[in-house]
Amino acid sequence: MASSLTKDSVTPGTPGSDKAFFGHPRGLATLFMTEMWERFSYYGMKALLTVYLLSGGPDAGKGSMGGGLAMDLATTTVIVSVYSAMVYLLAMPGGWLGDRVWGPRKTVTIAAVTIMAGHLTLALPGGQAPFFAGLALVAAGSGLLKANISTMVGHLYDGPDDPRRDGGFTIFYMGINAGAFFAPLAIGTVGQKVSWHLGFGMAAVGMAIGLAAFLLGTRNLSPVSSVVPKPLAAEERAAWLRKGLFWVIAATVFYGVVGFTGHFTLNWAMIPLTVIGLVVPAGVLLRIKRDKELTNDEQSKMSGYIWFFVAAAVFWMIYDQGASTVQAFGSNDQKTADSLLGFDFPTSWYQSLNPLFIMALAPVFAWLWVWLNRKGKEPSTIVKFSMGLVLIGVSFFFFLIPIAMAANGTAVSPMWLVGIYFIQTVGELCLSPVGLSVTTKMAPAKYASQMMGVWFLAVTAGDSITGLLSNPAIAGVDLSGTTAVFGEAALAALAGFAVWMYRRKVKTLMGDVR
């Protein structure tokens, strides 16, 4: 809904600027709760995703609960990868809808309802049809919400120079990790031990609580969050509606014919989505790079940024297999023991390790960089990036050890997986915050508001590569095999070494950015 409010109409007396939440605007509590419960629902469902797809199938292990979709590991990896790729790909149109059509506040409301509907659909019995419909709804809703809720946090503060701003985002991201940590413990336990569909239903309840918190606390948000920053003109709106309707009809007719003639298989959806997940990031980067309105300095920075983007895609390609390849290894009781010190636990709990390590280590890393900076020894952005890549490679070199140990039928200790997730988290803390920062610093002025979406596309590209590699109809690579794991580890390590070797060239392209 369009609003007559503008940014200039917000005064210090508005609700969005009240101090009432750890010295921050009261609206931060609303957004903290909304994001925490949204992440609770999202990561709870994601923790169940791989084990549910594998359950009852050939790669689930003898102790599988059954009742899942009984898919093999290759198909499971494709589905999990494509799903994650689409969540991050849809963040760009989600941001566009917030900027041009609905405004951030209304977009977040629509997103939460869509996510809740997706989880409820996943909770329905009926096999693959409700499962994929629910997955599509959750991906669409998450894409809508991702960019807009972060934008609304920024609206609570008096511009980028507000001294409370960084602290506010830190509190907000703690909400993300708190929700992500508790979700597998609650939803994962119910899903694996009681009922898959009840677990998915719990995710819907989590999102419902988040939506209620958001609607009850909207009065505390900045009025700017209701504004459509760059509303579409009537002619533009009509043009977009025509284009959208055309593509919806075309897709419906095409897939209707394919389905009616009995030719439809899962790859009719999976392969186009993975190709889109590679073509769109490449196309967006190419469009920005070829824009003749960019200054020479901006062109140079974009050339440097492409190095970071490709490196990040390699990183996320391996990192996100923590929810597929690594999770599947940990969920197979013939490869990994499902108890530790006599305590049995649902294997979905592995997905709580990353947010736990993030909450424990993020303050340590923040302190470490400041301490090294004071001594004049803080690694540069380029070096931190290369460290992240090397570490993600090390995590898969480390993965080779339990793979080899389990090859003779001996179930390894869960602590091997704890080690993998720990190394990956350390790598993430070297690369991810730096990537977000360098994206904002190197963005051309013309694309300043779009570049965060471009950064998310690195995740899309990495996951799409994983999907194409694993798909039996394309490459058919066994990503859980020794050769593939070694190859990916070596690729990441070499990429990190290459970034470090060419650091002077990249530094020159970056101009005044450090």
Image (cartoon, grey):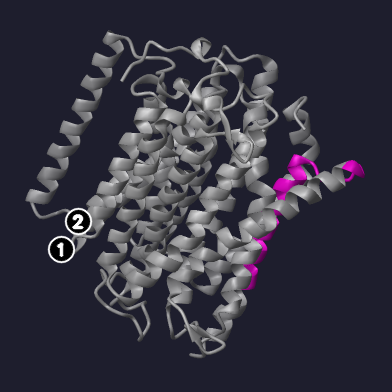
Residue assigned mark 2:
130
Spatial CA span between label 1 and label 2: 6 Å
Give left or right: position of 139 versus 421: left
Residue 307 appears in the figure:
no
Check disc 2 and report its element: helix, strand or loop: helix
Q: Are there few (<14), some (14-19), or many (20+) residues within 10 Å of tag 1? A: few
Assess whether residue 241 is covered by the magenta stretch.
no
Picture coordinates of residue 174 (x, y %)? 58, 49
Quarter of the figure that contains the C terminus = top right
Specify the amino acid type for callout 1.
Gly
Q: Which mark is residue 126?
A: 1
Picture coordinates of residue 355 (x, y %)? 56, 58
Span shown in magenta: 374-398
Specify the amino acid type for callout 2.
Pro
Q: Are marks 1 and 2 in contact (CB under 8 Å)?
A: yes
> Image quarter for residue 435?
top right
Camera-side residue of 511 and 203: 203
Pick out the residue farthest to the right: 375
Q: Are there few (<14), some (14-19), or many (20+) residues within 10 Å of tag 2? A: some
Q: How many marks?
A: 2
> Image quarter for residue 11?
top right
Picture coordinates of residue 30 (x, y %)? 46, 39
Camera-side residue of 253 and 34: 34
Seen in the picture, residue 114 relative to 330 is either above or below; the reply is: above
Give left or right: position of 332 versus 203: right
Q: Main secondary structure of the magenta part?
A: helix
Q: Residue at x 50, y 49 (%)?
A: 462
Check disc 1 and report its element: helix, strand or loop: loop
Q: Residue at x 24, y 26 (%)?
A: 244
Give left or right: position of 109 versus 126: right
